[in-house]
Image (cartoon, rainbow, N blue to C red):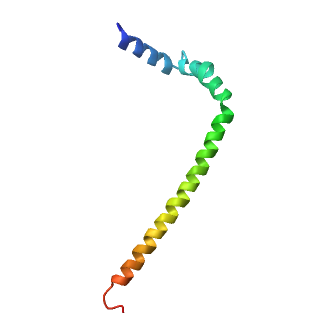
Amino acid sequence: LPFYYEVKMAFVIWLLSPYTRGSSLLYRKFVHPTLSRREKEIDTYIIRAKERGYETMLTFGKRGLNIAATAAVQAATKVPGTM
């Protein structure tokens, strides 16, 4: 594509320029309406992710405690002269 890098640089400058407010325009025209339409769906995904994260933390926490307890018992039984 001819002038690809030049067009790309002009687009980035347009996005970042406080005079043109290009990023603000794109957000108001495209991003915000899309997010607004899908707000309930996004909230549902966030709640599910939060629940899964909590469940995963509990699962790995239990596994970690089991591994630590097993290691402690094994270390205690291997110490010479304790019995």
18 vs 43, nearest the viewer: 43
Residue drawn at 63 percent across, 28 percent down:
35
Q: Quadrant of the C terminus?
A: bottom left
Residue drawn at 32 percent across, 91 percent down:
81
23 vs 79, nearest the viewer: 79
Residue 9 place in picture, x, y as percent? 40, 16
Q: Residue furthest top?
A: 2
Image height check: is 80 above or below 3?
below
Residue drawn at 36 percent across, 79 percent down:
75
Using residue 45 as the reference point, say whether residue 71 is left or right of it: left
- Quadrant assignment, res 82: bottom left
Image height check: is 47 above or below 27?
below
Residue drawn at 37 percent across, 11 percent down:
4
Using residue 7 as the reference point, say whether residue 32 is left or right of it: right
Using residue 66 as the reference point, say whether residue 51 is left or right of it: right
Residue 57 place in picture, x, y as percent? 53, 57
What count of labels does the image hold? 0
Residue 56 place in picture, x, y as percent? 53, 55
Q: Residue furthest left?
A: 80
Residue 19 place in picture, x, y as percent? 54, 16
- Quadrant assignment, res 45: top right
- Quadrant assignment, res 80: bottom left
Q: Quadrant of the N terminus?
A: top left
